[in-house]
Image: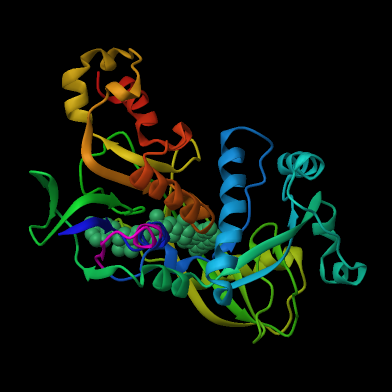
Amino acid sequence: MFDVAIVGAGICGCSCAYMLTQAGLRVALIDATGIAAGGSGAAGAFVSPKFVKSGPVKEVSEAAFRFSLTFYQEHFSELTSVSRLLHFANNALSNERVAYFREHTSLAQATLEPEYLEHINLEARRFESLVLESSAVVDAHEICKKMAAAATFFKIDVNTLHHQGTSWSLNNQLRAKRVILTTGAYRHVVDIPYFTPRAVFGHRINIKTSSYNPINVHQFVSISQSDSEGVIAIGATHDVHYNPLNASNQRYDVATGRATLLEKARRTMRLEHVDILKDFTGVRAGSVDHLPLLGLVVDSKKTLEHLPKLRRGKQYDINKYEYYPDLYMMNGVGGYGFVLAPFLAKMLQDFIMRGSAVTPLVLPSRFLRRWCIQKCR
Ligand SMILES: Cc1cc2nc3c(=O)[nH]c(=O)nc-3n(C[C@H](O)[C@H](O)[C@H](O)COP(=O)(O)OP(=O)(O)OC[C@H]3O[C@@H](n4cnc5c(N)ncnc54)[C@H](O)[C@@H]3O)c2cc1C
């Protein structure tokens, strides 16, 4: 019997495995394919904040950025490359946002050597920009593996989840007192009709180039600093129409994706003598309000039996909802899984071990009433 079973070994599952094994729990980490085999294995794994002006997305994103940047440096420094981040706006709307961010952020800013700007195209420089003192790129695969090291890994496609007595049975193969669902853009293992992950397919590439880039640059795509072998990561495309998890989709055209990535990177900076070393593709899962989901999973069927007026939009305290016992989820981290996951996993560790509250901004229950009004009258 495990204290916790985590279904899904991407950055969300691996961050939970790390925090909970650190807290002394016996953890089973389960994945149908392997560690970092989903969206997490495709990520460029840039660790940077979201450049938004205000509101809950900024609040969560900035807190997560500060936490995770320090976390990676303290615990996985050998897999974390820290550098300044040059962030450019890329259209008229974001121009105003970036200027506002630069004037109001409390994140430390830095300057650039004038000669560095010679690598940046004039067109790019017409947009507003700012330079953050610190951002990072982490080694996605290795960090997931290291985070998972103290958990017991099982390669199982989990199809059934039953609560019996005081524990969960997974596929009638494994038992655990608690279950955490970190299944990203894949199908749900239990009924969660009020949250459908917004699947966004992405492609990124690793290139070798004779152009040296000492810092991370974001504009139309993200361009990493050159590593010790001169390799630069460029990513990612955003495609809401193609989804390899959906069997009916056509094949993906890798050559077009590569050309798009290079063209976008070259709109920002000069990259000469480019060889494409490797392609990475995967699907990330976002939410409609751009905030992640973390917390207990609502049992919508039981809740509606108990609170039928929810169907007519009546508002209830979320403590009145019915929850599956000891069943948690972490999902909806979108294009910021490597920023959000360690921060959210720490929050979950504090909730499980000490009963500390999870910020209401990210609770999955926030979607239940909206779903009822729209779908279940
Ligand atoms: C091209 C690309 C570039 C990106 N770049 C960045 C970046 O620079 N910075 C950043 O922060 N984020 C980036 N992202 C986003 C980041 O990759 C995601 O936010 C992150 O991978 C989400 O992690 P996850 O653990 O939720 O999901 P995933 O990594 O998709 O993991 C889910 C796992 O669950 C498993 N699973 C699902 N259902 C079951 C089941 N029933 N039984 C067993 N196993 C199951 C799957 O096999 C999968 O391994 C990028 C994404 C892509 C695609």
Front-most of 291 and 351? 351
Q: Ligand 1, what quadrant? A: bottom left
Q: Is residue 353 left or right of residue 269?
A: left
Front-most of 149 and 56? 149
Can residue 201 be seen in this snapshot? no
Q: Quadrant of the C terminus?
A: top left
The residue stretch that appears in magenta: 19-32
Residue 374 screen position, x and y as percent: 33, 23
Q: Quadrant of the N terminus?
A: bottom left
Q: Is residue 212 left or right of residue 166?
A: right
27 in the magenta segment: yes
Direction right: furthest residue: 114
Residue 117 screen position, x and y as percent: 86, 67
Seen at 15% across and 55% down, the residue is 159
Q: Is residue 300 left or right of residue 225?
A: left
Seen at 61% across and 79% down, the residue is 207
257 in the magenta segment: no
Residue 177 screen position, x and y as percent: 19, 50
Quadrant assignment, res 112: bottom right
Can residue 279 be seen in this snapshot? yes
Residue 192 screen position, x and y as percent: 26, 39
Seen at 20% across and 44% down, the residue is 190
Quadrant assignment, res 260: bottom right
